Amino acid sequence: MHQVEVKITFYAVLILLGVCQGFFISYFLLRKRSRQIRRNFYLGLFILSLSFIILEILLNYTGMMSRIPFLDNFSEPLVFAVAPLLYLYIRSGLNPGQELKERWHFIIFAFYSVYSLFYFLQPIEFRLQSYLYSYYPELCDGENHSIFNADPFYIRRYLNEIILLHFLLYLFLSLKLLISKYKEQGLSFFTLRVHDLGHYRNSVIHFTIVLIIFIIVKIRFGRDLGDFFIASYIALMMYFTSFMIISRSTFFSDKTKNDSVKYMKSNLSDDQKEEIRQKLLHLMESEKYYTCNTVSLVSVAERIGETPHRVSQVINERFEMNFFYWLASFRIKEAKKILSGEEKDKYKIEEVAEMVGYNSKSSFNKAFREMVGVTPARYRDSFG
């Protein structure tokens, strides 16, 4: 098999570090506790998809792909996943309680993943020659090594044009949704003032720049030779995203400082904290105190014979969440059991809400959607 000399340049290092950064960010966004917030789930998948895409570009650019040709185009189907994921991230962030028919957004991705089998099932020599044709045409042997047509419907021949149209569609949908929210809040889309919509706007701007680079590269180079420019900018996006996550982290915020000051004078030992933690678990899991609709931090503290300050400290430090999210986690867990059990059709949604401690159906729906990602009714329907 033909092998080319591996080249390590500034761009290669930049992209490699971006890949590592992307995998690192997506890991934290897709952890069990983080992905319960729907926008984190979509953002994690978006960054993970981009990481695989620029990883392949890195292998192509450096020449490493000539040594592992079985991986050629392994991330190509993901190109049709990134735009829908960005749109769903923005939509779930702007409308956290809204139901999303996400499966329809991935029809093209699913179709192209299956269609790619015409290419992936070709012999290794065919895939090597395909790579060499794109990056090192002088090394091609000119022979046809395919065992069947790798592009029977000529989709790959017009792939760049299809990708461009796909990206433009979701860019339009994202901009339409975002501009509508800006108008609702009476803000200018290009305002420099710090606001809640800024993160979503910046994501759309970055995506637009990637799209512009994509168009320029394809016009200028034709084949895949200039893809490293796209990957380099995406790598910079990864650095920017990491910076934003760190800057917004409570580890560096005044809140952490305030919490540290708040609990600085606490004389609770580790044994005492564990004892309080066990009391809290017994109160919630054995006595199911969360089903009471008048639960508060004060009432919980009174039930276990502790002060609210101590209970708050233990919940923050041992459960790593605030009191309201901690309380909701027990209520939603119980609701999921009811809605997936044998008697799931016996109760109305508002009855389930009351059974787990909520005073209203709307507050129950909001909490359930935020923690599970779907409405209680849709969750019940998924169990037949």
Image: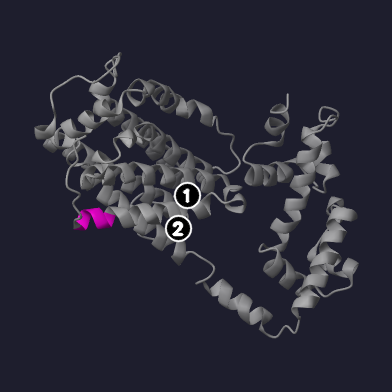
State the image coordinates of residue 65 (x, y, percent, origin top left): 26, 41
Mark drawn on residue 47? none
Residue visible at 73% across and 52% down? 328
- Amino acid type shown at disc 1: Gln
Mark 1 crowd level (few <14, some 14–19, many ≥20, 10 Å Cα): few
- Of the pair 134 and 31, the residue shown nearer to us: 134
State the image coordinates of residue 104 (x, y, percent, origin top left): 49, 26
Q: Quadrant of the N terminus?
A: top left
Structure colour scheme = one colour
Magenta-colored stretch includes residue 12: yes
Eye-nearest disc, 1 or 2: 2
**Residue that badge 2 annotates:** 195
The secondary structure making up most of the magenta span is: helix
Q: Quadrant of residue 243?
A: bottom left
Mark 2 crowd level (few <14, some 14–19, many ≥20, 10 Å Cα): few
Q: Quadrant of the C terminus?
A: top right
- Of the pair 46 and 289, the residue shown nearer to us: 46
Q: Quadrant of residue 158?
A: top left
- Spatial CA distance of label 1 from label 2 is 10 Å
Asked if the residues shown at circle 1 and circle 2 are in contact, with their CB atoms under 8 angstroms apart, the answer is yes
For the view shown, which residue lies furthest in the left direction? 138
Residue visible at 48% across and 64% down? 248
Q: Quadrant of residue 73?
A: top left
153 w.r.t. 18: above or below: above
| Magenta segment | 10-14
**Residue that badge 1 annotates:** 185
Q: Secondary structure at mark 1?
A: loop
221 w.r.t. 55: above or below: above
Could one spot residue 191 in this view of the protein? no
Could one spot residue 129 in this view of the protein? yes
- Amino acid type shown at disc 2: His
Which of marks 2 and 1 precedes in the sequence? 1
